[in-house]
Image (spheres, grey):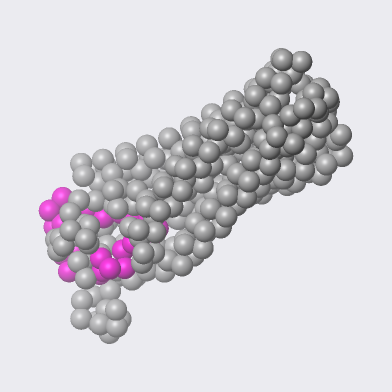
Amino acid sequence: MGTIIDNTLGAVFIGFAVACAVYGILVSQVFHYFRNYPGDKSSFKYLVVLLVVLETTDQCFIGHLVYYYGISNYLDPTVFAKGEMTWSLILQLTVGAVVGTIVKVYFGFRVWRFSDRNIWITGLIMILAFGQLGLALAFTIEAFKLTTIFAVHQIQTLGTISLGVGVCTDIITAGALCFFLNRLRTGLKSSDNLVDSLCSYAINTGVLTSSQALTICSKYNATPPNNLFFTACYFILSKLYAISFMATLNTRRNVRGRGTDRQGGTTTNHTNLFALGTRMPSMGPSDLEQWDKVDPPFIISQKDSGGLQENGFQSYDDYGYGSYLEPGSEAHSMK
């Protein structure tokens, strides 16, 4: 009986404790975002709020599971022996899948932008992302038919395929971002170092989430049916996706260049990081107020660029593209 409790209540409790810590990191990232990017686009703010609401709901479901096993039935050892299924565990798995899909789609749009709207690679990422969501919903439907948590191994194949698709999505997304970012190299040390930093962010994000998914998959398939440590690992996965999304938003000011922080009062002219044969925008000091509304900003100081486009300004659409505007033009004066 002791072993059963360790593998059920013990696993769930450990997973809940770690999930609380990771949730705290997410909340701190959200606080940092709203404090430092008050002028960001409303769509980003709504998306951040949505992810926080989903992750808070996810955490409540995990808490209910711990309460059910540890408080409501602490004097009933048959609950642990039978591994009674709870609705909160099933819905937690579903909410986690929704969060993962939202973040994957967001990174898919980043690939769309950096690849100059390559429909093939972006379409593949979107198909995989929504395909995994469909598999997760199918898993949810099948899970509600089970009478015990231990019977979740009866739908092991479906769960494994879903996790595998998620891993493939993360790897393809990270690889695509690195590939298309490397095509934007200019030969300038400053810009190439910035590309290296962006590639590093993409790789670290993909490695973090895919390695966690692989851990869940291995425990799901290798552990006996009365072991719930794979669920403890899953408690953390969606929060890692949410944190990777928040990190992308919060590191824009660090990644975008040198001497460009509007709070620091710098008025140095800036130019396009990818000015050589790319469609990425260039900006001047008068545009800094709008800079944080663009995802993601990439600029370097004028002196690092060799003096390209000294007086140019750039208008943006929602995807960060736009046409070059001459200073003093009607469109420029309207800004």
Picture residue at 57% right of the left edge, 48% below the top: 55
Where on the picture, by quarter, is residue 144?
top right
Residue 43 locus on image (x, y percent): 49, 65
Quadrant containing the N terminus is top right
**In front of the other: 7 or 241:** 7
Magenta residues span 287-313
Residue 76: give x, y in percent of width and height: 80, 27
Identify the image quadrant of the C terminus: bottom left
Q: Is residue 219 visible?
A: yes
Q: Image quadrant of residue 213? A: top right
Tell me, yes or no, whether the highlighted magenta stretch contains residue 308. yes
Q: Residue at x 79, y 23 (%)?
A: 77
Residue at x-position 34% and y-position 52%? 252
Up-down: is 286 above or below 305? below
The picture places residue 196, in percent across and down from the top left corner, at 32, 39
Is residue 191 one of those drawn in magenta? no
> What residue sits 67% from the left and 35% below the top?
66
Q: Is residue 274 visible?
A: no
Relative to 37, residue 135 above or below: above
Residue 40 to residue 190: above or below: below
